[in-house]
Image (cartoon, rainbow, N blue to C red):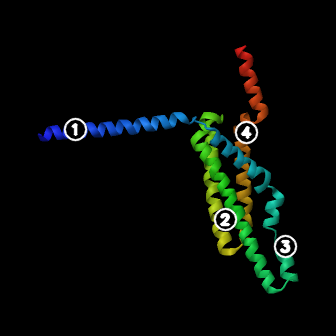
Amino acid sequence: MPLSMILLVLYLLLGAALFASLLVMALRRRGRAPGSAEAIAGAQQALYTLQSSLLAPELVERIFSREDLEFVAAEAPRPVHKLFLSERKRLALAWAHQVRAAMVRLRRFYLGKARQYARLDFRTEVELAFTFTLLLFACRALELLLHLRGPYAAPRIVRATATAAARICDISEKALAFLNPPALAMVEGGTAGRGA
């Protein structure tokens, strides 16, 4: 068998393999809607978690409140004081981690699906991207400070993180407002009304 015939067979096999892999990828993508329900539900869940619990001012204030520290320092023996600091540090780290994780879920939605579903103008998209970047940086810095210095080391970063997260929640809520049940009913009713 001549060399040219062997190369021809190899190229044909390579072409068939590439065609098969493209076909598999195309069929996989067709199965998922571009703004799959999973992505939308994940964004809504992250938004709900942030707004209903993680960013509640009472919770943030209580986790990082110096009043508890001062009370335990004044009233409890040294081992209890150390245990209190250790537990409060774990709690503060868990809070910062959960805020960051929820922000990452929201950011993934915006990067992958928002242009198709959330009606954002260019200015809002730029503001959102900038705020996400700052917030994720602040979350990492906060986690590092909490780990190194404890829950009372960075009250300004805690406030800045909570404020930036609340700003993203406000923008997200407006952008995803059409996914709320009353808005969906209006969209479905409007579509059904036009079709009749």
Q: Amino acid at mark 2?
A: Leu
The residue mark sitting in front, 2 or 1, is 1
Whether residue 186 is situated above or below residue 8 in the rendered picture: above
The residues bearing labels 2 and 4 have C-alpha atoms spaced at a distance of: 27 Å
Query: Helix, strand, or loop for circle 2?
Result: helix
The residues bearing labels 2 and 1 have C-alpha atoms spaced at a distance of: 59 Å
Residue behind mark 2: 142
Quadrant housing residue 21: top left
Identity of the residue drawn at 64% across and 45% down: 127
> Residue 18: x, y in percent?
35, 39
The residues bearing labels 3 and 1 have C-alpha atoms spaced at a distance of: 76 Å
Residue behind mark 4: 174
Q: Nearer the viewer, residue 63 or 135?
A: 63
Residue behind mark 1: 9
Of marks 3 and 1, which one's residue comes earlier in the chain?
1
Q: Amino acid at mark 1?
A: Val
Quadrant housing residue 56: bottom right
